[in-house]
Image: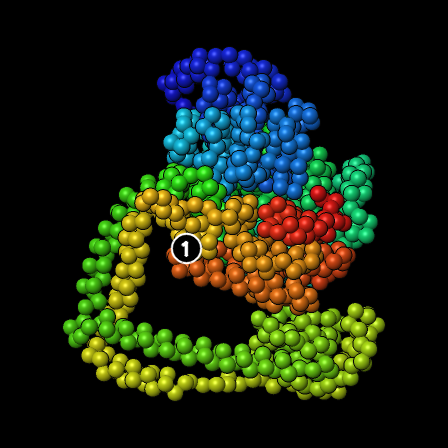
């Protein structure tokens, strides 16, 4: 609670604001009168600052109503006859905000721009993704004329590693007379962010509210029992630091752990058959201990307690789909007959928007069956039309439970009465990581619908290994610092240098939030450096050996280990070559055993493997009549021909009957005894020179004076610690030395790459040198992609000039596509079954990517994301007219993934239709867009 003095100071500040805002206060009164609810204090404070002509940063919890401030900026723009742009990080949120503003101001005054959709682009109010505004600024678009207000919703997205830099570009480059409204989730360094905004934009008011409009109660579910997380004395709206845990919860956990017996330890075997895929359910328990309650049990308990509708966060696309399957298999139904009729009406409207031939491929029947029971999934791989239907049905109270990944927590307006977290560990793109306090706050912020619920509920499912004390700490902390992810890019460099000198651009970049934070961190780093120096002195004293130089002895050990590792790698390479040779030797009719992976088992070769980047990949038919390709991933030790079966010359792998007959022949051969696979030996051996060097080093090690020291291993251990601390100290020293110019230095390195490749050139005008954009750099300005330089080089080299429209569409996927983080396969493996021209173009793309990567490493830049050919085959088929069912069956893509990647592909093809260097290629880019934009993809657009 605030003190009387603080409340009086706030009153004085509000009165001063009202005086300064003058006539704009009348606008605020009119705006407030039109709202269906009274404004909260933080909303009114922020609007008063905006009315007084200041920029505003608003940081408030999810669902608190901070978008009201953005809507007031739109109101002020319309009243003053100036344009207002409302930017969002994702297209779904842009679409949602567009519809809201159309309802408020009319379709004739509101437009939408999201890269692939353009509606009324010249309107007074335009909703757009942040990248669209950035591109407008660089293009010096006429649409910026008369711009008075920009709202940046979800501005905390500037911390996103892949796209966050775009937010800083916009903030730095917007004209000074444009008022900026920044809306952020609750962050713990809002004042720091506000100080930076004031430095680069002028006076910026920081308005922070940590009060949720709907109190949030925290719970844990232990077996079938939902229990409060905190004691009754804790205030749900402000639990404070280290709130006491409910003793009844602690006792329930103890009882559950004591009671966990053989039934728990057996795992999911018996019951898993009835709930979908074994081992894929929620929880955090290992093989033993307490497991989370079944999903149908959780929903029944929530329903009985009146805690629906609920969002259940699963953190896995496959997990979301499996959860829906499990609930359906349980027979649970959460809807009434009247609700099912209304759901049917919504789904019928949805079905007519999907081409009839695609309904089965997108899984419409299964989706409709789940929705009619009040259950649905929501994740990035879901068809956007399905996501739209889920959001509509959930907001209407017809779908009661949504199993979702964390992407739902970003912006999309789907508040619920309850939020359930099945686990507190999620995949972060590199590995499994604990949910952070900031992520927990974002996820549970969906609980509690303003104007509907008097309280919201967050429920964590208990499993062995989940500590209630840790959950209490997670739920009560408000630590969500905003960290800049800004870095100079190639497109940014040529755009900025096209209108300013290199020195001036460096000055602009040094104003970034990344540099602002870097400068502020130097003091802390210097303190760490001093501690490291003190620690090193102690380590060196402890590692000293009176018999000799322990550092020299440790270097001998390290050299021996390196040579042994080199030998192991050489032997592994020999085994890989032998395995590749065995695959290359296979012929149609050979019977082999696939030793590992999802495709393990017996198979017969139907087509020999062609050589490629990752070795030969012969096509085989399995006992289950499935046609697959195998490579070194499935047979790392190679394969041995265990027998043969006859394959008719007219065999067609696409004919189900012929596959059935051949699979039958394979099973007969196996039954007659084709023999067991012959495990390969290691092959190869140590090189002679390597063995000689190893023997010499081992003799030197045994002869070293420190080798006979009785405390040798203690000295070695301290020496290794000293080496590690020295490396860390050196890294700290480098960071301190480079902190104050880190962004500008990266910009110089980007310029060095562009100068080397000819997109920039150095000039000498009467002794004054400068950097100018070349003709090639001029059209690089219009290429916006994470792999913009690879794209520019492919266009410039003519590698894509001979491609047809379909081939161009497939080749361009290498620029936009990125495999999911848990896919560790070879992203540049040869793509089989495509045209020679496309294959040649893909070789050029991969080669270009490697060349740029080498150049970036040479100048000291972090390499750009590697090209990824994982989508080429699918888009090659799609652009040539293949059915949706065939495209999905031949890949691991879902329909939603295909539509999402097609949208990004269309964005790049649209850029090529304007920026490609030749008229013929620009024309083919437009033709490629027509080929991609069909069927369900065209319906989505």
Q: Position of residue 260 (x, y in %)?
A: 56, 58
Q: Position of residue 779 (x, y in %)?
A: 54, 47
676 sits left or right of 372 in the view: left
Label 1, residues with CA under 10 Å away: few <14, some 14-19, many ≥20: some
Question: Which quarter of the image is occupied by the C terminus?
Answer: top right
Query: Which color scheme does this rendered protein use?
Result: rainbow
Q: Kindly identify which residue carries mark 1.
A: 861
Q: Is residue 191 left or right of residue 580?
A: left
Foreground: 591 or 581? 581
Quarter of the figure that contains the N terminus: top left
Q: In this view, does 195 lie to the left or right of 217?
A: left
**Residue occupying the point 58% across, 15% down:** 30
Instruction: Please state the horizontal and vertical placement of residue 76, each as a whole percent of the image.
Output: 55, 20
Q: Is residue 420 left or right of residue 433?
A: right
Which type of secondary structure does the marked residue at label 1 adopt? loop
In the image, what residue occupies the spot 61% across and 82% down? 582
Evaluate whether residue 376 shows in this view: no
């Amino acid at each position: 609670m605030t003190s009387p003095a603080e409340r009086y100071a706030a009153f004085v500040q509000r009165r001063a604001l009202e005086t300064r805002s003058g006539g704009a206060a009348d606008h605020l009164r009119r705006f407030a009168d039109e709202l269906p609810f009274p404004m909260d204090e933080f909303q009114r404070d922020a609007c008063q600052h905006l009315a007084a002509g200041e920029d505003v940063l608003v940081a408030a919890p999810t669902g608190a109503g901070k978008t009201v401030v953005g809507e007031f900026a739109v109101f002020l723009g319309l009243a003053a006859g100036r344009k207002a742009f409302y930017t969002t990080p994702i297209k779904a949120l842009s679409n949602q905000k567009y519809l809201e503003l159309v309802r408020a101001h009319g379709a004739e005054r509101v437009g939408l721009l999201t890269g692939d959709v353009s509606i009324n682009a010249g309107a007074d109010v335009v909703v757009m993704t942040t990248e669209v505004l950035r591109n407008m600024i660089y293009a010096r678009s006429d649409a910026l004329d008369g711009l008075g207000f920009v709202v940046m919703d979800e501005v905390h997205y500037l911390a996103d590693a892949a796209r966050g830099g775009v937010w800083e570009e916009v903030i730095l480059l917007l004209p000074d007379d444009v008022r900026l409204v920044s809306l952020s989730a609750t962050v713990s360094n809002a004042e720091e962010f506000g100080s930076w905004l004031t430095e680069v934009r002028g006076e910026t008011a920081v308005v922070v509210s940590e009060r949720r409009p709907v109190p949030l109660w925290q719970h844990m579910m232990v077996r079938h029992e939902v229990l409060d997380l905190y004691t009754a004395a804790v205030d749900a709206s402000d639990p404070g630091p280290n709130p006491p845990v409910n003793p009844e919860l602690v006792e329930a956990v103890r009882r559950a752990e004591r009671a966990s017996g053989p039934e728990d330890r057996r795992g999911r075997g018996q019951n898993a058959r009835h709930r979908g895929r074994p081992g894929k359910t929620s929880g955090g328990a290992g093989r033993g201990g307490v497991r989370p309650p079944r999903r149908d049990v959780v929903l029944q308990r929530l329903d009985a307690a009146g805690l629906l509708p609920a969002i259940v966060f699963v953190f896995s696309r496959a997990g979301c789909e499996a959860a829906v399957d499990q609930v359906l298999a349980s027979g649970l139904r959460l809807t009434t007959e009247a609700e099912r009729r209304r759901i049917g009406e919504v789904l019928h409207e949805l079905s007519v928007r999907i081409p009839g031939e695609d309904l089965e491929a997108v899984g419409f029947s299964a989706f409709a069956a789940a929705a009619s029971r009040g259950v649905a999934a929501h994740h990035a791989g879901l068809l956007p039309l399905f996501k739209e239907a889920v959001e509509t049905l959930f907001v209407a109270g017809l779908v009661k439970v949504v199993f979702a990944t964390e992407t739902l927590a970003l912006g999309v307006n789907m508040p619920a009465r309850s939020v359930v977290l099945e686990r507190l560990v999620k995949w972060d793109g590199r590995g499994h990581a604990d949910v952070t306090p900031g992520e927990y706050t974002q996820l549970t912020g969906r609980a509690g619908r303003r104007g509907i619920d008097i309280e919201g509920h967050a429920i964590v499912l208990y499993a062995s290994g989940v500590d209630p004390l840790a959950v209490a700490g997670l739920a009560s902390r408000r630590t969500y610092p905003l960290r800049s992810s800004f870095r100079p890019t190639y497109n940014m460099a040529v755009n900025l240098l096209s209108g300013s000198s290199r020195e001036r651009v460096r000055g602009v970049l040094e104003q970034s939030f990344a540099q602002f934070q870097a400068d502020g961190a130097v003091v802390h780093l210097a303190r760490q450096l001093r501690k490291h120096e003190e620690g090193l002195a102690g380590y060196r004293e402890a590692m000293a050996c009176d018999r000799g130089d322990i550092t020299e002895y440790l270097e001998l050990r390290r050299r021996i280990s390196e040579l042994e590792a080199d030998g192991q790698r050489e032997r592994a390479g020999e085994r890989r070559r032998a395995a590749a040779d065995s695959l290359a030797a296979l012929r149609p009719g050979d019977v082999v055993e696939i030793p590992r992976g999802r495709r393990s088992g017996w198979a017969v070769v139907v087509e020999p493997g062609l050589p490629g980047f990752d070795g030969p990949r012969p096509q085989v038919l399995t006992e289950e009549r499935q046609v697959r390709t195998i490579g070194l991933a499935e047979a790392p030790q190679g394969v041995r021909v265990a027998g043969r079966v006859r394959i008719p010359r007219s065999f067609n792998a696409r004919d189900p009957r012929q596959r059935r007959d051949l699979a039958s022949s394979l099973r007969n051969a196996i039954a007659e005894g084709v023999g067991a696979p012959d495990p390969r030996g290691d092959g190869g051996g140590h090189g002679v020179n390597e063995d000689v060097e190893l023997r010499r080093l081992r003799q030197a090690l045994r002869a070293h004076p420190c080798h006979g020291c009785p405390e040798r291993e203690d000295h070695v251990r301290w020496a290794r610690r000293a080496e590690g601390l020295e490396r860390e100290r050196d890294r700290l020293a480098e960071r301190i030395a480079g902190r104050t110019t880190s962004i500008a230095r990266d910009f110089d390195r980007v310029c060095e790459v562009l100068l080397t490749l000819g997109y920039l050139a150095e000039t000498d005008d009467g002794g004054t040198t400068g950097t100018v954009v070349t003709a090639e750099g001029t059209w690089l300005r219009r290429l916006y992609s994470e792999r913009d330089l690879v794209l520019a080089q492919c266009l410039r080299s003519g590698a894509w000039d001979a491609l047809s429209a379909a081939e161009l569409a497939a080749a361009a996927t290498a620029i936009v596509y990125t495999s999911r983080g848990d896919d560790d396969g070879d992203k540049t493996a040869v793509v089989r079954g495509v045209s020679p021209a496309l294959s040649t173009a893909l070789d050029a793309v991969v080669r270009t990517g490697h060349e740029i990567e080498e150049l970036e490493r040479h100048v000291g830049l972090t390499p750009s994301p590697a090209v990824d050919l994982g989508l080429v085959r699918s888009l090659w088929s799609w652009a040539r007219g293949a059915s949706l069912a065939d495209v999905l069956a031949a890949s691991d893509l879902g329909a939603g993934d295909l539509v999402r990647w097609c949208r990004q592909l269309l964005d790049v093809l649209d850029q090529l239709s304007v920026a490609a260097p030749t008229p013929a290629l620009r024309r083919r880019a437009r033709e490629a867009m027509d080929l991609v934009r069909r069927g369900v993809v065209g319906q989505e657009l």
